[in-house]
Amino acid sequence: MTEKSIPTITGTLTGDFAADSPILAQAGAIIRAGGLVAFPTETVYGLGGNGLDSTASKKIYAAKGRPSDNPLILHIEDDSMLYMLAEDVTDTAELLIRDFWPGPLTLVVKASSVVPKTVTGGLDTVAIRMPSHPAAAALIRAAGVPIAAPSANLSGKPSPTSASHVKEDLNGRIDMILDGGDVPIGLESTIVDVTGDVPVLLRPGYITVHDIKEVVGECLIDPAVLHKPEDGFVPKAPGMKYRHYAPKAELTIFKGGAANVAAAINEAVKKAEEEDRKARILCAGANVHFYPEHLARPMGNDEAGEMIAHELYRALRECDEQSVDVIFSESFDDNPLSEAIMNRLMKAAGYRVTEV
Ligand code: TXA
Ligand code: MG
């Protein structure tokens, strides 16, 4: 899509998520006419276009500056859309759907012939999810078609967790932004390949391997999820191979005991300041006292990891806004969402880790 000079319309949702409310009806009409609308989901904001229209998918890739071999997720609102888009829905898929839809779980299934190749990046599978955010559901209803939507950020930037993040990245490049406030989760959905009998985790998220095993007994993990790109495993989710979620600053993760990590980070900060580089520290709420107050960005204190997940992308974007040069982060591996949190943080750090 050529860049538009007119600013993107912002429609603020006020808790009225009826598909026939004026804002949602307008947004639905834009999607049906082949335009692009950014909208809130429970995970991150999505950049939506008509999932059955290959021209709309091309516009999405262009607006994001995204390589077109990185397929899109189709967002649906009811089961009938699933059976239209999937060639085959395995028993494993049915079990996961029963427990986790609508919600932050994306399923990779065999694609039917109605799915455009531009959506799947040429694959014979398609990623589908049924979001639980009421605004997302209402938008799909208003549009009357499945909505193809990647995260609504410029390619390579952290995913947007508020409408202002979307505006920063895509203003003037898309037709409309639906502002539904902050998203609840803050990290992208879990992606699971359910084309075989045993599900395979392709991207960790809020629904964990533990959650999946509770429903279907087994869950494999794509080896690329657990390794650095240099280790040579090619991820089954094509998007996972790109350097994602990156802030402009150089980010280093420190691993070890809390006191050792704090000492090493404070040393690194001193060195950065001697070199006139602006530093920032991402730390657990309980550890702020270790660090100079004006440099510490507390990420929450919850044992569940939910606050850390919620704050991660926002904190990375704040560092960009404040023209930070170097970010030193504690590692957050002691919570149920650590797989998802550390997967994103490691990518943002380009896998730069200092063990202390
Ligand atoms: O939470 C989310 O999933 C958000 C919201 C907007 O729904 N969307 C999102 O989309 O994160 P995106 O495009 O940023 O990430 C989609 C991921 C990519 O890594 C892509 O490679 C993978 O899904 N994917 C899509 N289709 C696939 C397929 N057929 N097989 C394997 N991976 C697939
Ligand atoms: Mg994305």
Image (cartoon, rainbow, N blue to C red):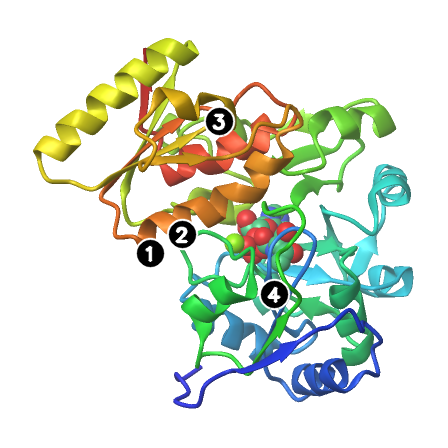
Q: Which mark is residue 175?
A: none
Report whether 90 appears left or right of 248.
Answer: right
Q: Residues within 10 Å of mark 3 (few under 14, many from 20)?
A: many
- Residues 280 and 212: in front is 280
Count residues near mark 2 (Cα–Cα under 10 Å), then give few for <14, some for 14-19, many for 20+: many
Disc on the earlier residue, 4 or 1: 4
Q: Which of the two marks, 4 or 1, is nearer to us in this view?
A: 1
Q: Which residue is mark 1?
A: 321
* Residue at x 40%, y 29% (from the top left corner): 228
Q: Which label belongs to residue 119? A: 4
Give the residue at mark 2. 317
| Residue at image location 50% in from the left, 22% down from the top | 286
Quadrant housing the C terminus: top left
Residue mark closest to the camera, 3 vs 2: 3
Label 1 beta carbon within 8 A of ligand 2: no
Q: Tell us which disc is closer to us: 4 or 2.
A: 2
Looking at this view, is 180 or 301 the one in front?
Answer: 301
CB of mark 4 near ligand 1 (< 8 Å): yes
> Does residue 222 sit above or below 319 in this rendering?
above
The percent coordinates of residue 289 (x first, y second) are 40, 22
Q: Amino acid at mark 3?
A: Ala
In the displayed structure, 277 sits above or below 155; it is above
x and y, in percent, of residue 294 in the image: 32, 37
- Going by the numbered disc 4, the residue's amino acid type is Val
Vertical placement of residue 27 versus 182, above or below: below
Query: Please, what secondary structure does the residue beneath circle 4 have?
Result: helix
Secondary element under disc 2, as helix, strand or loop, is helix
* Amino acid type, residue under disc 2 in the picture: Arg
| Label 1 Cα crowd, 10 Å radius (few <14 / some 14-19 / many 20+) | few
- Give the residue displayed 14% in from the left and 34% down from the top: 273
